[in-house]
Every structure is written in C-alpha cells, then in structure tokens.
Image (cartoon, rainbow, N blue to C red):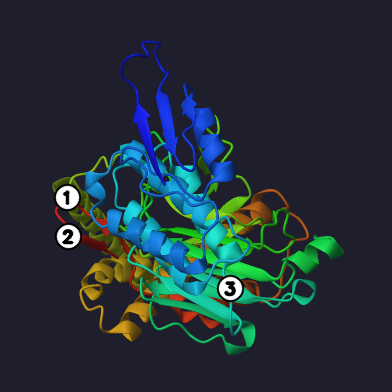
C-alpha cells in the first residue's frame, strides 16, 4: 500500500492537503488527520512522502525487532537528527513497546536506542525528555524476566530488573561499578566493596509495608536504571547549581513508593571533587516542577555523608536521584593566598609554642609559683596547648607521606586528643574559679587536683578511643578539593 500527499494546487487553503490512499480503493480526503485515522483503522500500514517509512498497527514480534533495528541504525549518528525527527522516532518506538510484554532482544535494542539519544544536544531533546524516561520505565515494567534477573547494558544507560515478593520484600541492594558491570545483591550476600561504585542504592525490607495487599501483589519486580548522561534531566531553574553525578533511578513495578519508615540509602560517585566551601545536595527528579517539564527537588532527601569521591543520601521515596553542587559560593582564595595564610598559621602556632614553653619553664624553675591550685591548673592547660600546637605543626609535613597510613591516623588521633584536653582544662579552670569566687564556703574537696587531672586527661582519652573504635577511618588523610591548577589540598 502506498499513499500520495499533495499539498499544492488546486487546494489553496492553509493547512489543507489532498491525500489519496492507494489501497483497494482511492479515498480523497482534504484533512490529513481523517485520512490517517482511516488508514490506522482499516489498513495494515502507510507510507507517505518518505517522512514516516512504516507504521504498522498489527505486526509480529519479528517485524517489531526489525523496525527497532532500523530505529537503532537511524540514531547511530544522533547529530544528524533534529528535534522533530527525534519526536517521530520516539513515537515509533512507543508504538513498538505498546504490547503487554517486551522481549529481552527488543528491550536491549530499545535501551541502546535511548543510549544513542542521550548523546544528542539538550535543545534537540528538550521536548522529548519526559517521553524518553517513560520509554525506559516501560521497558523495565514489561520486560520478560527469566531466572529472576534481567540486565541490559549500553554505553550511556544501564537497566536491571529483578523479580521480588511484594508481600515479603527482602532488603536488596543494586550497584553499578562501571557501564558494563551492574550487580544486584541481597543482604545475605553483601560483601565489602573493592572500589567506589558509580551508583548504588539499598532498599530496606520495609519498602512495601505501606502498600495495600493488592498493591503488594503488583509489586512483583524492582527496576534499577543508571543514566551516565543527564541529557533528559534538564532543569531550567538550576541557577548556580550543577549536577555532578550520574542519575540513579529505582522503582517497584508501576507503584508510587513514598513515606518510607526506613530511608532508601543512595550512594553516588562525584564526577568532580567537592571543595570545602561548596555545598552538595541530594535531589530527586520531580516531574511536576517547572510547569510539568520537570526539575530537581530536595524534598524527602538528605545528605548522610559526603566525601571528596562520593555522596551518600537518604530518601523516603523512590524515583530518580542525583547530586547537585551549589557553585554560588565562589572560592575566594587563590593558591597563592592559601599558601600565604598557611605560613601565617604556622608562624603563629610556632610563636605560641615558644611562649608556652617559656611559661612552663618558668613555673618549673620557681617552685613557689606552682604551689597553689590555680597555678597547677594553668600548668596542665599549658601542656595541653603546647602539645596541640606541636602536633599541628608536624601534621602538614606528615601528610606528605600518605602511604604511611598508621602514622597519619596516629597524628590525627593525638591532634584530636590534645584539642579536647585543652578545652577540658579550660572548663576545669572556670569550675575552679566558680568554686573559689562564688561558692566560697564549704568547698573543700579531697584530692582536688587528682580528680581534676582524671577529668582533664581522662575524658578526652575516652572520647578519642570511642571514635577510633567505631571506625579507624574517622582519622586519616583528607583531601578537601583541588585548586584550579589541579594541585590537591590535602590535610
């Protein structure tokens, strides 16, 4: 069957065409929409003027695959397509995926088509972004899963679908180490990770507790997507913020999962270091923002932990997640200014250490000066401050040896200890002044200085022991960021 579209004379009315459908009989129509409707209802296909090569209303699985391969070929050079052609291509792909089930082969081709489309410019994809996200969700929802898990990998998009029991949902984790390695692990098989994944999410066992029994029956599969490129997640209201991670999506069947009692934990690798004076935010994609075009929102999400290489988020719902960096706080210090301030700090700490040493020597040289309680407390405070300054001065030098992990951890441990000891002895000195000046009478305390010493040196010791016992990585080398020239700022 062929068709002929004639938009020239004798019709001069704008927007009207003479369409003759060459089927069993000719159907002259002036309104092209009526003609197309007639064809879709009564015929098997249409070809008109080379714009749409084939649209089948009833095709076999084999022809669906062939059409999908043709679409994949058309997107091999995405730079040649404009926004109108991309819209037509997406429409054809949506028709192919309209059936109840999607085979693994068809799903693989569809995901690769989307992967190619993610390489287009933002202007080209602006009008189709929401539909492309819908195509990925449709593939995950309708994909035929054999063996409990199905994985589709492409250069810019990864999809993993896992069948689950909605009534007895197990704690499940998904992670992607690189574009070619997506994993789904249960709690029983969780292992220590060897490297930081591009993205991962841990779904709690309470995920489906808020669902009705009917909804739990529908919750038969979990879908995990990871977008290497954020082409379809463009927020025109970002302002001084930018996305610094891939986009990780998770969903359960076609259900809305919100108000979780136990947050889903999302970990995303930062695409660039986060300097200390910049703020990273955990966000999700909200389709209702910006008049329906979508945008990033922080509602229900919070930052659990943020390092140079990764950001850990907690969210009480499932959707698409990312990390935004607020770049409105410009770095006010150049590398030269930072070096100058560093030297000023070292000189100040050095002078402080010298005079603290002179103070201690004075008290040690003259026994009469250290007989009363205030003098003894002052000596303890001077010792804590002297060691704090000394450890701080050698800290930057020891950071030049990152391979000596034990040395770095011990230095940070002592720095924390003497800092806490300094504050503790300051507090004890104020307590003594209160007892001496306010509560003048009935203030006798046996072994006064011994008890003060146990508190002044013992309490900080307990704190740092607990901190290092919880996780030894609480102490060690920290890289806060990089200067514009690329040199790291390690402490």
Of 70 and 379, the residue lying toward us: 70
Which mark, by number, is residue 235?
none
The residue beneath circle 1 is 335
Q: CA–CA distance between discs 3 and 2?
A: 50 Å
Disc 1, disc 2: CB below 8 Å? Answer: yes
In this rendering, position of residue 48 left or right of residue 370: left
What crowding class fits label 2: few (fewer than 14 Cα within 10 Å), some (14-19), or many (20 or more)? few
Q: CA–CA distance between discs 1 and 2?
A: 9 Å
Of 345 and 87, the residue lying toward us: 87
**Labels in figure, total:** 3
Of 5 and 198, the residue lying toward us: 5
The residue beneath circle 3 is 144
What crowding class fits label 1: few (fewer than 14 Cα within 10 Å), some (14-19), or many (20 or more)? some
Residue at position x 23%, y 53% in the image:
77
The answer to whether residue 208 is seen in the rendering is no
SS label for mark 1: helix
């Amino acid at each position: 069957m062929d068709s002929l579209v004639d938009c020239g004379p004798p019709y001069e009315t704008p927007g009207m065409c003479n369409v003759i459908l060459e089927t069993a009989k000719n159907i002259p129509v002036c309104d092209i929409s009526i003609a197309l409707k007639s064809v879709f209802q009564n015929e098997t296909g249409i070809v008109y003027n080379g714009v749409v090569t084939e649209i089948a209303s009833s095709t076999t699985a084999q022809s669906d695959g062939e059409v999908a391969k043709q679409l994949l070929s058309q997107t091999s050079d995405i730079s040649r397509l404009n926004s109108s052609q991309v819209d037509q291509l997406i429409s054809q792909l949506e028709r192919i995926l309209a059936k109840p089930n999607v085979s693994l082969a068809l799903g693989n081709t569809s995901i690769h088509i989307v992967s190619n489309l993610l390489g287009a410019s933002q202007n080209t994809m602006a009008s189709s972004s929401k539909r492309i996200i819908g195509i990925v969700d449709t593939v995950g929802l309708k994909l035929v899963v054999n063996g409990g898990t199905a994985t589709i990998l492409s250069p810019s998009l990864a999809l993993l679908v896992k069948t689950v029991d909605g009534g007895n949902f197990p704690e499940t984790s998904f992670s992607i180490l690189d574009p070619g390695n997506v994993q789904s692990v249960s709690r029983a098989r969780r292992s220590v990770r060897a490297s930081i994944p591009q993205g991962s999410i841990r779904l709690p066992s309470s995920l489906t507790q808020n669902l009705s029994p009917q909804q739990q029956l529908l919750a038969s599969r979990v879908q995990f997507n990871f977008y290497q490129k954020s082409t379809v997640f463009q927020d025109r209201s970002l302002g001084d913020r930018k996305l610094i991670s891939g986009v990780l999506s998770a969903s359960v069947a076609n259900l809305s999962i919100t108000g979780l009692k136990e947050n889903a934990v999302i970990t995303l690798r930062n695409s660039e270091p986060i300097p200390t004076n910049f703020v990273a935010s955990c966000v999700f994609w909200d389709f209702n923002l910006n008049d329906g075009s979508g945008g990033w929102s922080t509602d229900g999400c919070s930052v659990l932990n943020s390092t140079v290489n990764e950001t850990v988020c907690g969210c009480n719902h499932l959707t698409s997640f990312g990390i935004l960096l607020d770049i409105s706080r410009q770095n006010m210090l150049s590398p030269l200014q930072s070096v100058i301030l560093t030297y000023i700090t070292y000189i100040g700490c050095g002078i402080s250490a010298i005079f603290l040493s002179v103070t201690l020597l004075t008290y040690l040289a003259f026994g009469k000066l250290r007989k009363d309680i205030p003098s003894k407390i002052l000596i303890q405070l001077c010792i804590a401050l002297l060691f704090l300054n000394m450890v701080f001065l050698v800290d930057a030098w020891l950071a030049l040896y990152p391979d000596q992990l034990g040395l770095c951890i011990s230095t940070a441990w002592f720095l924390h200890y003497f800092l806490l000891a300094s504050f503790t002895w300051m507090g004890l000195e104020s307590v003594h002044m209160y007892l001496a000046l306010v509560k003048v009478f009935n203030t006798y305390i046996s072994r006064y200085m011994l008890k003060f010493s146990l508190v002044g040196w013992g309490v900080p010791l307990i704190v740092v022991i607990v901190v290092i016992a919880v996780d030894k990585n609480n102490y060690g080398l920290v890289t806060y960021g990089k200067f514009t020239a690329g040199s790291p700022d390690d402490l």
